[in-house]
Amino acid sequence: MSKKKKATPNASRQRSSRRKKTSSAPVSTSLEKQVLELFRQNPEVEFSAKQLAGLTGFHGQQNVEGYRKILETLAAGGDLAKTAPAKYRYLNQPRLITGRIQVTRSGAGFLLQEGGDIFISPNALGKAFNGDTVSIRIKPQRSRDRRREGEVVEIVTRGRTTFVGIVEESLPGKYFLIPDDDTLRTDFYIPAEALGAAKAGQKVLARFLTWERRLPEVEVVSVLGEAGEHNTEMHAILMQYGFQPKFSATVEAEAAQIPEALPEDEIRNRRDFRGITTFTIDPYDAKDFDDALSFRHLPNGHYEVGIHIADVSWYVRPGTEIDKEAFTRATSVYLVDRTVPMLPEKLSNFLCSLRPKEDKFTYSAVFELDSEARIHSEWIGRTVIHSDYRFNYEEAQEVLDGTLEGPYREELTILDKLAKTLRANRMGKGSIEFESNEVKFVLDETGKPLGVIRKKIQDTNRLIEDFMLLANRKVSEHLFKIKDNPPLPSVYRIHDKPDPDKLASLQDFVLAFGHQADLRTPGDMSARLNELLRKVNGTPEQNVIENIAIRSMAKAIYSTNNIGHFGLGFPFYTHFTSPIRRYPDLMIHRLLTAYGNGEFRGNPVQMEDELRHCSERERTAAEAERASVKYKQVEFIEDKIGQQFTGLISGVIESGFFVMLDENMCEGLVPVHSLKDDYYTFDEKSYALRGRATGNVLRLGDPVTVTIAGTDLRRRTIDMTLVSYR
């Protein structure tokens, strides 16, 4: 490694250590116990800090302040309850908080809370797994500056009961499951009678039995195949995250009974667009086409643009087996080499898919636009269409650019101009635009990755995006305007404002790269974020800064409680345009029909529960997709051990730092114990590792050169060693 300094005397003990914050005025533990005992002896009495100071005979301000800190600490730990602005009383039982726990790779956990997540150290997790609903006891805080910590006292419900992993035989006849999920801090014991037909070295799906001994016990449910085989690993990822690769025989049988012909009486009830120019634009390898655009000139010089969405609600009725399965899945899942659909193939790829040269039932949002993309009229309702042509994005872009002789160039040109105007208007009103960093693998016939390419976003991608955003926004507004008493509930896609503390940290972070940004002053935050993104566009640190900016944002979710969508700058927004692959879109289609007919279905409480489930499945699907990408990245790199690459530091943790390679966007870890030139400590605020003796800093976004040191396909990890930096 360049810039090498003398190593510390005991290099083997080098490891990161988190800086511990201490209060400027530590509170005496013995005095804290005395105060708590006073409350225990007087459980019905309320005390203030001033009263406690008076009881000791010392009324000075310093004593009052000390007691105030003690009261705050005991209240934070759940021993006292605050009953007035300055008074506290004793809680007979320690306060327990119940919620869903999230465990990280480091083994630490967090109880997700609106008022701030509660940290749970690895040794306080007990027998809880990632995703479990648990009750925790809040630990007393010894300092006001420290984050809240808790310990698991009860597992209310298991978030999952099945696990994926490799069967390992440690001793003759002694079998264990080594789980793929790196948030699990334990292996599982497989009793001999629970092994079934599984053999050592195979990847299996196992069901949780009990945890009464040192290790939890599981039984093998099914054998997925030999570990390391492409199909085995992709199935394992799906199973790990709770997605079934196939539909049940019952669901498939029900789908097979759905008629393919469109009923003439239903066609007559719909607005007919079959004579109007209509086409789809999708990825070249797409099989389900759930949106199409129609276009025509109007006599007054305006344009009519129709955004037509597959009418899945016509085929999938509430209460059917298909509907139950679609809700359970809630979303399609997109792994590196396959799509696992929300709906059976007959629906997703045939009946509902807007395939060219076929009549299809659709739900449509139709707009009359002038040349400046101003809306003069709009209509939302059920339609029938006939797609004239199927574009992929690349072909449509070449036609738009004039490099390919193809159909509908005039229509594409006008739609592109309108979309760019819609986008400019959206950005002017606060929409935030992040660059896409998605990768795509070039695979051979066996699934082995031959190359990694960055997905290119073109004008035709943005054209479709902006018209879909228009439809989603207008449908949400349309449903909101349907008045009733009480107001009718709807499905919203909401995105809360960023956390001020995270924005302040982002401001400090970008300043280290020489970029000015005011993210602390209240006001038009979206405009300032967009200005920051423009400043860093094209710089080496762009990707890192955008990732940190995204982390400072709240996550978009589904809800009946509308708070608007901060990221898009829309006061009303929903998902209407992808019912083949998202269940909330299907819910919106049903609401449009029910409310349009003067009917009401469901209740807000039930809808909110359903939407919470959809949000959770969406997050889980994203995790599965990332896991498949990570697996293929490791598989792509495993024959490049010893080779050098340049990259940027993309993440910093206590145990080391992650590097994203410039050439192929693969990411690996440089362990802190491999840094022999100094003892490095983790600086959480500045996303950096700092050398204690040398003062060297390894910071997020720094350019580095690394060597590939090793790979682990099971753990989906790449190990690197640092060659040089800066």
Image (spheres, rainbow, N blue to C red):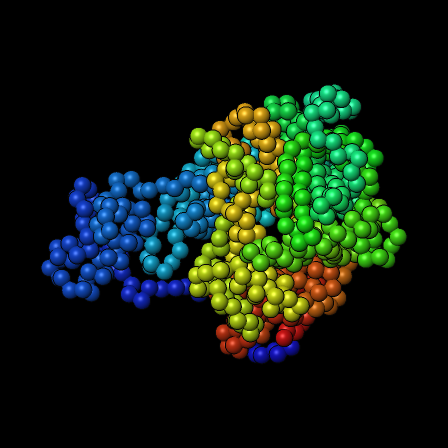
Seen from the viewer's position, the closer of residues 71 and 205 is: 71
Quadrant containing the N terminus is: bottom right
What residue lies at 78% left-to-right and 23% top-to-bottom?
Answer: 261
Residue 506 visible within the image = yes
The image quadrant that residue 382 belongs to is top right
What residue lies at 55% left-to-right and 49% top-to-bottom?
Answer: 570
Residue 660 vertical placement versus 622 (above, below): below
The image quadrant that residue 222 belongs to is top right
Residue 121 position, x and y percent, is: 45, 51
**Hey, which residue is sitting farthest front in the picture?**
300
Residue 169 position, x and y percent, is: 66, 41
Seen from the viewer's position, the closer of residues 640 and 440 is: 440
Residue 398 position, x and y percent, is: 83, 55
Seen from the viewer's position, the closer of residues 533 and 93 is: 533
**Hey, which residue is sitting farthest left in the picture?**
57
What residue lies at 54% left-to-right and 61% top-to-bottom?
Answer: 527
Seen from the viewer's position, the closer of residues 657 and 597 is: 597
Residue 582 position, x and y percent, is: 64, 38
